[in-house]
Image (tube, rainbow, N blue to C red):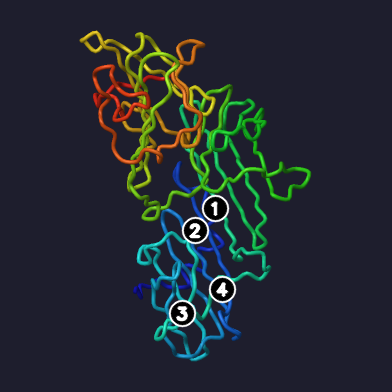
Amino acid sequence: MTRSRIPMGVCALLLPALSLMAACVPDGSGTAVVSTALRSASTTVAQGEVTALLAPWIQVVLVKASGLAPDTDFALTADGVPVATLSSDAAGEVDETLLVDDLGVDPRNTDFGVEDGEDGEDVLESADENDDGHADTTLDERTQLTPTDLAQGGRASTHLEIDEDGKQEFKVKIENVPPGSYDVFVNGLAVGTIDATSGKGKIEFASAPDKDELALDFDPAGATVEIRLADALVFSGTTSAQVPGLDVCEPSKGHQMLEPASAGEAVAKLETNEDCSKEFEVEVRGVAAGAYELVVGGVVRGSIPVTEDGSSRTKGGIEFSSELDEGKLPLDFDPVGAPIEVRLGDVVVFSIGTFDPASHPGGAGDVDDDDSGDGDHGAANDLDDEEVSASDA
């Protein structure tokens, strides 16, 4: 367990300023302040609070507690696992600052507690003063969305707040943009329009809305956000602040075959990397040559050029990346759970109602070169691995 520390006074000064500095972070990044109240796990008067400060330039956890046994070692636990040593003073208080990197957890998704350093008995646990089954955790998370060239130097941001009663407020703001009406999409769902005829504007949602707010009838936490002007993408990103050293994912691969309307084969693939970057690809084969539209979640995402490969067979593909890799389109939407269609003009050639890459995990082998595959494509899990360049719709 770690004992790494930085001066508490430094963090105390940064806490009130962190929200003001959120506008200064790079596009695609953000800040978050997460605070969880701790209560006694028994009948003692002990209590405490764990507060995480997350930004590109700082990632720390502040631990405060009182009513503990004096001059005693305790352990800070994350989801029941000890991750750091805490020491109370002569008054039975703890006031320490820990580096998130040393804890090895994301404080935004962690249930903190304090246990006795010797016998491992729980001393403090996440509070539930309202007896509603939820810990008293507050969140203030702000992100800067990534602009396209259409933003013309403008900026867009999101702001999610959750108070100790579980009430939520979510805001999306744009500024210094070309005048117009901008549609806001959250996880592919159109949730409202921002009037930016003056070059700036915002839209606000709340779980308990007032007259200036819309009902928050969707979950904005960790969601993908798109802002569009006349169907053209202007900004995109996520409501989860991308914090260095925290955004780590379990690497995975998955794929799913699309149902053909008649002939041919198509597969959609999604790969998630350890740094949480993602690659999405759709490949088709055995259909007439031409430019096919890829539609995901009801929105045209790009064009699949299908051509002959030199042996009288046709194939084509389109690739997306969240890292904006050269030769790939930006993955600024979430394909998981969305319907996928491949169209030629107004004709749907391939489709699937819900993309679920987890239904076929792992890497995919090549589609057989003959046409004797079984009805459910059996081992036909993929098309050829040759790269096919992606082009915009």
**Disc 3 versus disc 2: nearer the observer:** 3
Q: Which mark is residue 108?
A: 2
Q: Is 63 above or below relative to 240?
A: below
Query: Does the CB distance between marks 3 and 2 fall below 8 Å?
Result: no
Q: Which mark is residue 38?
A: 4
- The local secondary structure at tag 2 comes to helix
**Disc 4 versus disc 1: nearer the observer:** 4
Q: Is 308 above or below relative to 278?
A: above
Q: Amino acid at mark 2?
A: Arg
Q: From the image, tell me which residue sits under label 3.
A: 115
Q: Which mark is residue 67?
A: none
Q: How many marks?
A: 4
- Indicate which disc, 2 or 4, sits on the residue closer to the N terminus: 4
Measured from the top left, where is residue 157 in percent x and y?
55, 42
Q: Which mark is residue 141?
A: 1
Q: Amino acid at mark 1?
A: Glu
Q: Amino acid at mark 4?
A: Leu
| Image quarter (top left, top right, bottom left or bottom right) of the C terminus | top left
> Relative to the observer, which residue lies in front, 233 or 81?
81
